[in-house]
Amino acid sequence: MANNSKNHIWLKPLILVLIVGGLTLIFYKTGLIHFFLSKEKLLRFMDSLGPAAFAGFILLQVVQVVAAPIPGEVTGLLGGYLYGPVLGVFLSTIGLTLGSYIAFALSRAFGRPFVDRVVDKSVIGRFDYLLHHKGAFLVFLLFLIPGFPKDYLCYILGLGHLSTMEFLVIGGTGRLFGTILLTLGGDYIRRNQYGKFSILVGVALIVVFVAIAYKDKLERLFRIWHVTSRRKERRKEMKGK
């Protein structure tokens, strides 16, 4: 079981590398690489789409949260590459917030049987303690720290005690840091600032791999923290009575 868990931890980064590498090979073999490497051609094409380009990008972010067919890191970089740091963060945040709301609302509407079909049971088991109490700050940390399954958390939290507004505020602010970093990375590529991009990627990789390496310990710490805070609240309630 332990080996399977460790293999699962490294699965997503491996899939991301394979997808990026595979797409690069396809683009190179078909000649599409020249279109995507020409920022002028790509931006002219996006501009020709008008408002539809904005709507399409937002929809892409929504889909990657709800159905997760592609890694969110790819769409985050794409936003910075196409729209720059300010507009890229703005559009990504809209898409991620809408996608998170849809996942949360679906979970709240259809309940545990639906979530059991969408989310792996092992993931639900790891975060089931979030279903018994709000733990707003703890949820914020889970969205903030890399390596945690944020999209799945949207479904799980829909079964808990957070209100829709609390969820959107906490999830939105928690995702914002990662969104800014990814968008900056895409903008650096757009401006040919590969030195800054390399530094950003290096720092991000260190943070991600540290988070992955200590993910189990962090989850245990968060669970203990959650239980302790819950006990303190119960004691206060008993004293109030």
Image (cartoon, rainbow, N blue to C red):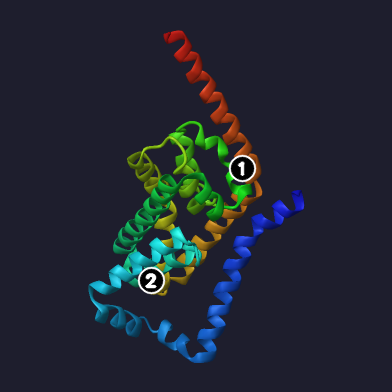
Q: Nearer the viewer, residue 224 or 202?
A: 224
Looking at the image, which residue is at 60% across and 62% down?
Answer: 13
Q: CA distance from mark 1 to mark 2?
A: 38 Å
- Which residue is located at x 49 percent, y 36 percent? 138
Query: Dot 1 surroundings within 10 Å: few (below 14), some, or many (20 or more)?
Result: few
Q: Position of residue 60 (x, y in %)?
A: 39, 67
Q: Nearer the viewer, residue 111 or 33?
A: 111
Which quarter of the figure is the C terminus placed in? top left
Q: Secondary structure at mark 2?
A: helix
Q: Is residue 156 left or right of residue 49?
A: right
Image mark for residue 81: 2
Q: Is residue 15 above or below residue 133?
A: below
User: Which residue type does callout 2 highlight?
Assistant: Tyr
Q: Which label number is shown at residue 125? A: 1
Q: Position of residue 230 (x, y in %)?
A: 52, 24
Vertical arrangement, residue 170 with respect to residue 225, above or below: below
Q: Residue at coordinates 25% horizontally, 82% vertically from top-left? A: 48
Q: Is residue 190 visible?
A: yes
Counting every numbered tag in the picture gives 2
Task: Residue at 51% x, 45% y: name it.
Answer: 112
Q: Residues within 10 Å of mark 2 (few under 14, many from 20)?
A: many
Q: Which mark is residue 14?
A: none
On the question of residue 147 being in view, the answer is no
Across and down, in percent, residue 86 comes to 30, 61
Q: Is residue 87 above or below residue 33?
A: above
Between discs 1 and 2, the one toward the N terminus: 2
Residue 68 at x, y = what percent? 49, 62
